[in-house]
Image: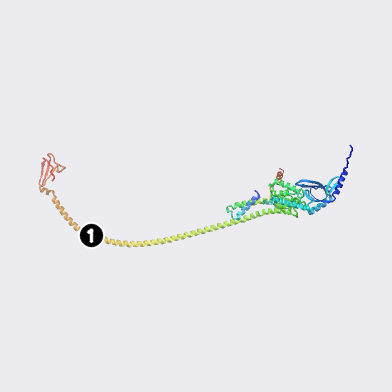
Amino acid sequence: MSDTRKIFSLAQVVSSIKKTIEERYQQTYWVKAEMHKLNVYPSGHAFPELVHKENDRIVAQMGGAIWKHNLERINKLFVEVVKEPLTEGSTLLMQVKITFNETFGLSLQILDIDPNFTLGELQRERDETLKRLQQEGVLNANQFLPFPLLPKRIAIISADTSKGLSDFMKVLTTNPWGYVFFTQLFPAYLQGDQASDSIQKQLQRIRKVKDHFDVVVIVRGGGGEVGLSCYNNYALCRAIVDFPLPVLTGIGHSTNLTVAEMIAYRNAITPTELADFFIQAFHNFSVPIKEARKLLRTYSENLLKLEKERFETAVNRMKQTAQLYIERKRGLILRTAENMRLTVNQGLTRKRTQLESSRSELKSDLLRSFDNQHAMLVRQAEKLNVNTAVFFERQQLQLEHLTNICHLLDPQRILQRGYAIARINNKVIDAENIPQGTVEIQIETSEFEVLAQHLATKKKEKL
Amino acid sequence: MKYTEAFEELQRIVKDMESGDISVDDLSVKVKRAAELITLCKAKLTATEEDVNQILKELEE
């Protein structure tokens, strides 16, 4: 089999490609791409991975190269303009030359990166984060949390070596009022690419023990003003607004506020100022307590004084009332006595007068009565005189009459006139003493006593 | 007792006294209670009860 194929060496191919590309891409180009990884080598050169994402999917990828001198220049410019070093994961506008290296292959040699574009990108991220939080209605969520009366248990997100942390702690621990704070450090990166994730991770840890804390602070300082764009990161800001405790920031810089600072419960320009805020909160708690003690004393004294006065007034009033009552009763008694005396006097006078008149009446009555009696007596006496004479006369007559009768009725005179008295056993014959048989009958006449014997008795016919 | 509760109760007592809602009968009880609350609140300002070990333990759970 004859070999008609043309065979190239790898060097020839690579050389050809290199030649083609160099001829085709002679100019430099401005390319927009996301720098996925910076990959700085110990040599000082960087070989970043550049990607193009659509809907979070990588649709194009290519390696880049930044030579040491370019990298240093670009970084310096970035820190000056953007206040950020070159940051992995950010979209950059780069001036590139398409190069082909025999051993490393195709790459984009990055000659320059436009800091103003990045600044715009960062501004855009900041604006987008703000807009999104606003749309989600959580922009002020953390600020609406109730602030603890005494924020004494503080979870601190900071770095061990941070100047900001030491400033913050110095104010809290050396305060001349002896206020004691409980603090616990949750170490995190405070700037640069890793800060957002790192801070979020610590927020999650604090959430687990949130009952031990009153507030969370994010404290940073002394690290210059670069690398703060992480505080505009949506995920971090969302984690802050959603946090169940107030999150306060003191990340110490003088440029535009980051979103995290805007949505935090409170932001202080420096960690020292933030610490002062806590001291002030303690004052705010302490002062009313001192005030309360003073007020308690004042009110107690006032109340007691008032009660004493009321009591005294009541006692006085009672005294006065009692006196008045006694006075009134005394007056009443005196008046009653006077009335009684007057009434008695009047009564006595009246009775005396009555008695007097009664006496004189009685006297005249008596006199009259005596006179009457006397007159009567006289009349009686006169009458008696007259009557006595008549009486005696009448008696004389009656006596004479009776004498006559007696004289007439004398049985001896009757017997003299021929009458006889028949007796049986000395008893007159009558219906009770009817003679029977041959009984002896004594017959008395005026001159004789005849003894006869009974023969017969016949009852006389009534006339 | 939480300092918020102590503080609020203290404020209430002071307010009651201020408005004259406390009678002389209650005065000594209320003042005694207020003194307790003041002591408690002052102690809160200068003491800490949190236990770091406990927090660390809970973090690991």
Residue A378 in percent (x, y) is at 24, 61
Name above or below for residue A55 compared with residue A397.
Answer: above
Identify the residue at the far right of this view.
A2
Identify the residue at the far top of this view.
A1
Name above or below for residue A371 compared with residue B60.
Answer: below
Name above or below for residue A366 compared with residue A4.
Answer: below
Q: Residues within 10 Å of mark 1 (few under 14, many from 20)?
A: few
Residue A219 in percent (x, y) is at 74, 51
Q: Residue at x 34, y 62 (%)?
A: A357
Left/right of residue A368 with respect to residue A15 in the rendered view:
left
Q: Residue at x 77, y 53 (%)?
A: A120
The residue that mark 1 highlights is A381
Q: Of residues A71 and A357, which is closer to you in this image?
A: A71
Could one spot residue A168 in this view of the protein? no
Q: Of residues A384 and A168, which is closer to you in this image?
A: A168
Residue A398 in percent (x, y) is at 17, 54
Query: SS for tag 1?
Result: helix
Identify the coloring: rainbow
Chain letter of mark 1 equals A
Name above or below for residue A153 compared with residue A370.
Answer: above
Could one spot residue A131 in this view of the protein? yes
Quadrant of the frame with the N terminus of chain A? top right
Residue A359 in percent (x, y) is at 33, 61
- The kind of residue tagged 1 is Ala
Q: Of residues A161 and A91, which is closer to you in this image?
A: A91
Left/right of residue A295 with respect to residue A88 in the rendered view:
left
How many marks overall? 1
Left/right of residue A459 with respect to residue A281 in the rendered view:
left
